[in-house]
Amino acid sequence: MAGKIILISGATRGLGRAMADEFVRQGHIVLGCGRSQNGIEQLRRHFGSPHDFSVVDVASDDEVKAWASRLLGAYAPPDLVLNNAGVINRNARLWEVPEREFSQVIDVNIKGIANVIRHFVPAMVKRKRGVIVNFSSGWGRSTDAEVAPYCATKWAVEGLTQAFAQELPSGMAAVALNPGIINTDMLQSCFGGSASDYPSATEWARGAVPFLLKLGPGDNGQQLTAPGG
Ligand SMILES: NC(=O)c1ccc[n+]([C@@H]2O[C@H](COP(=O)([O-])OP(=O)(O)OC[C@H]3O[C@@H](n4cnc5c(N)ncnc54)[C@H](OP(=O)(O)O)[C@@H]3O)[C@@H](O)[C@H]2O)c1
């Protein structure tokens, strides 16, 4: 399993950062992105070459296009794409969510995934190899008050993933993943103080990374839940 190329969107914090640590620890090459310049510089200093970290907003098709073009020129196509980058609305009833914030959640959580797929997957399809994991949520399969925009996007991720899975050649897979409930900035935003009752991203990644590395063509189209959340 060693030496796989793992693409992670949203690698600067939370689950993405913890997965980067664990994949590198296990001998894989991580190509990651995030919006925060500081976060990316810190990743570069921490991991160095051959790992690669870029400031990219996945909601920008142009930025994702340039990112993919540079990486696909320098590395083989990814073995595993983790569409992990995501945002949640501040807890609020739907009619209180400003239009701008609603659009941001849609642009990152849905269009961000489509942008990454648009620019990285053709190279993977060409060699008929690779797995794409689209990060969903428990709120992609159930709902709660005050997170309607987020729920809408994660239910969309489930539908998008199942349709996309039907388009892939045999040898590849796309899955929707509910990571579980993990104490990250995002969980603190929606759960407040009780977020600390849940496992840390580092603890979670120890179980999730081996699980992700085992995914293959037989999983195509599945709605999965990661262990340890
Ligand atoms: N934590 C949980 O319990 C939980 C439960 C269910 C689902 N999830 C899902 O798991 C994924 C990771 O969540 P998390 O808890 O780790 O969240 P988090 O702690 O808020 O981290 C989100 C990551 O995504 C990046 N990001 C956000 N918007 C981005 C954009 N437009 N372009 C590029 N990167 C972007 C952030 O970096 P920058 O700020 O540097 O851009 C950060 O690295 C999300 O898809 C989330 O919906 C999490």
Image: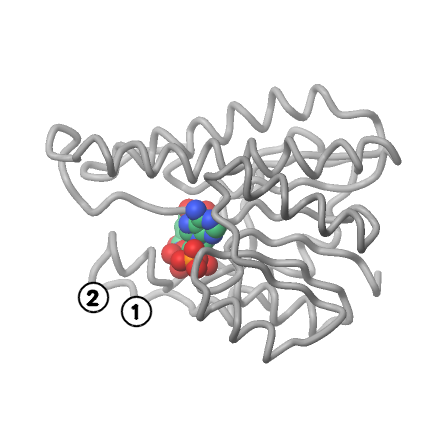
Q: Image height check: is 31 above or below 24? A: above
Can you tell which mark lies on residue 196? 1
Classify mark 2: helix, strand or loop: helix
Q: Image height check: is 118 above or below 56? A: above
Which residue occupies 80% across, 46% down? 77
Residue 192 at what x, y percent from top left? Answer: 20, 60
Asked if one can make out residue 181 in the rendered structure from this viewpoint, the answer is no
Q: Which residue is mark 2?
A: 193
Classify mark 1: helix, strand or loop: helix
Residue at the left extreme of this rendering? 96
Q: How is the image coloured?
A: one colour
Three-letter amino acid code at the position of disc 2: Gly
Among the 4 quarters of the image, the one containing residue 166: top right
Residue density around tag 1, few if under 14, some if 14–19, many if 20 or more, within 10 Å? some
Which residue occupies 70% across, 39% down? 120
Q: In the visual, does 123 lie left or right of 108? A: right
Residue 84 at what x, y percent from top left? Answer: 52, 49
Q: Image height check: is 101 above or below 211? A: above
Among the 4 quarters of the image, the one containing residue 164: top right
Which residue occupies 35% across, 33% down? 142
Residue 82 at what x, y percent from top left? Answer: 61, 48
Asked if one can make out residue 185 in the rendered structure from this viewpoint, the answer is yes
Work out whether residue 44 or residue 3 is closer to the camera in this orientation and state it. 44
For the residues labelled 1 and 2, say whether their Cβ atoms are less than 8 Å apart: yes
